[in-house]
Amino acid sequence: QKAQIGVTGLAVMGRNLARNFARHGHTVALHNRSYGRTKELVEEFGHEGTFLPAETAEQFVASLERPRRVVIMVKAGPATDAVIDEFAPLLEEGDMLIDAGNAHYADTRRREAALKAKGLHFVGAGVSGGEEGALHGPSIMPGGPKESYEALGPLLEDIAAKVDGEPCCVHVGPDGAGHFVKMVHNGIEYADMQLIAEAYDLLRRVGGHSPAEIAEIFKGWNEGRLGSYLIEITAEVLKQVDAATGKAFVDVVADAAEQKGTGRWTVQAALDLGVPVSGIAESVFARALSGGKDERAAAAEAGLPGPSAGAEHSGDLVADVEQALFASKIVAYAQGFQQIQAASKEYGWDIDPGAMAKIWRAGCIIRAKFLDFIKQAYDKKPDLATLLVDQYFLDAVSGAQDAWRRVVVTAAQQGIPAPGFASALAYYDGLRAERLPAALIQGQRDFFGAHTYQRVDKPGSFHTLWAAEGRPEVDA
Ligand code: NDP
């Protein structure tokens, strides 16, 4: 008996993916650097399906049907290279190595090119949804050569999350496209979480609501257009009471947010592509600020002053915050999708953005009702310049904007940080501005560096002889 698929790397993620394949009736070959994990899996979950445990890489490869499909689920980085180096020499032309870890897309591009030269298919697949998703149905974003999807796609679609019977898995595009999209998914997740946290903070500090009350507010929002996994779990977290102290759980947790790096990668890639993902960037920076122990201690010691008088919020705070949250969320997603489209163009990936919205509707952390509207927007117009001009989103943002502005004003007046809400609003106003002060920046650049500028009234590049027109010569 041969296995249809093999999994190497059997920590939480790999183990659950292997079980998921087996539960769907596939025979699964198992391998892990240290045999202990392999043995444990078979002992604990062997009854769930047919597993072929292997002690060595050679045994593992021999137990797979051709073309071989080897899922790698190990620590991202050098471990992935070590595993590839171990397996590649054992594989034959047409076999597939599928890296389902959180690799950087540039590594995936490099690995794909190297393995292609050896006649092997390398598929960088983004897998979202954590360990629960891996077991019960993740959202899967496979890249790599299109032809590999013919032999691999049906297996991945089997184990993926489903919405109305449709799998949350699609071939994203060649080489690193899958890992790129997974990275931006995580970046959007950062933005979503930051915006929700700002909403909570304002409801608490401006509205005076308790965590338990805010949990109820979020529960209500979850029934509406904000309905999403993150809103739902936020209500659960806010409801939680710390057993040891009897306080709200959120009040006993240290307020320094950690990060593993995919948010930072998203922003770094966006800087290289020149795409303004300010919502994602602010959320990464907000986490960094929260973790800036020394700076925060110094500020506390110096007593950095807040506003002398905090003005009351003018309006229905709960309703206004809901509007600000929804509008800011739209901006963050518009920016993330713009980044995907920019990368798709840069690398020739030909990604269908609507399909990305579709496969994020279940199995992943940012699953939300409103992804349906994103999908519809791109179905209507695949080359949409920005989601903000799609009628649904345009209506939502224009309906929200007065409330959104009131919330940003209140936050600023009361000295409560709301970088997500404020930067999203600034982005929105920047996008719709008829004239931007960028014209002045062009003038400055031309003045000190003769960088030239373009004019509004005729084509071409121009440079003004500043010194010659009566200004003193300056040293650059
Ligand atoms: P870990 O990232 O903790 O990695 C542990 C696994 O990697 C073990 O099987 C370990 O083998 C193996 N490993 C480490 N170094 C090497 C090496 N040099 N050579 C061979 N094998 C090695 O496991 P997770 O299950 O948490 O995550 C796996 C991947 O999935 C990661 O890339 C992660 O980023 C990604 N991911 C994780 C999610 C999560 O929620 N945890 C969600 C989505 C993706 P051994 O047992 O011998 O030590």
Image (cartoon, helix red, strand yellow):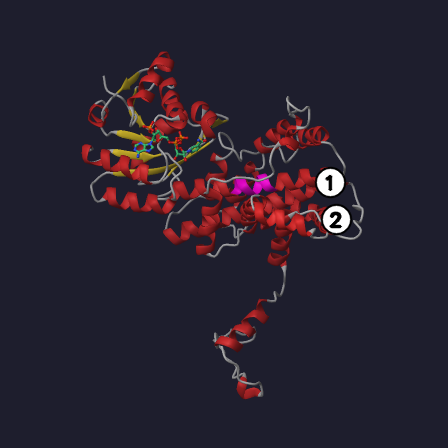
Q: Using the image, determine if residue 3 lies above or below residue 90.
A: above
Q: Residue at position x 63%, y 63% from top?
A: 434
The local secondary structure at tag 1 comes to helix
Numbered tag placed on residue 245 in the rendering: none
Q: Quadrant of ligand 1?
A: top left
Q: Residue at position x 56%, y 69% from top?
A: 441
Q: Using the image, determine if residue 279 lies above or below residue 120.
A: below
Q: In this picture, which residue range is highlighted in magenta?
A: 188-194
Sooner in the amino-acid sequence: mark 1 or mark 2 = 1
Q: Is residue 230 visible?
A: yes
Answer whether residue 37 is magenta in the image. no
Q: Using the image, determine if residue 75 lies above or below residue 436.
A: above
Q: Quadrant of the N terminus?
A: top left
Report the front residue among 429 and 473. Answer: 473
Which residue position holds label 1?
A: 205
Based on the displayed image, in which of its 4 quarters is residue 47 positioned? top left
Which residue position holds label 2?
A: 414
Residue type, numbered disc 2: Gln
Do the CB atoms of the residues marked 1 and 2 lie less than 8 Å apart?
yes
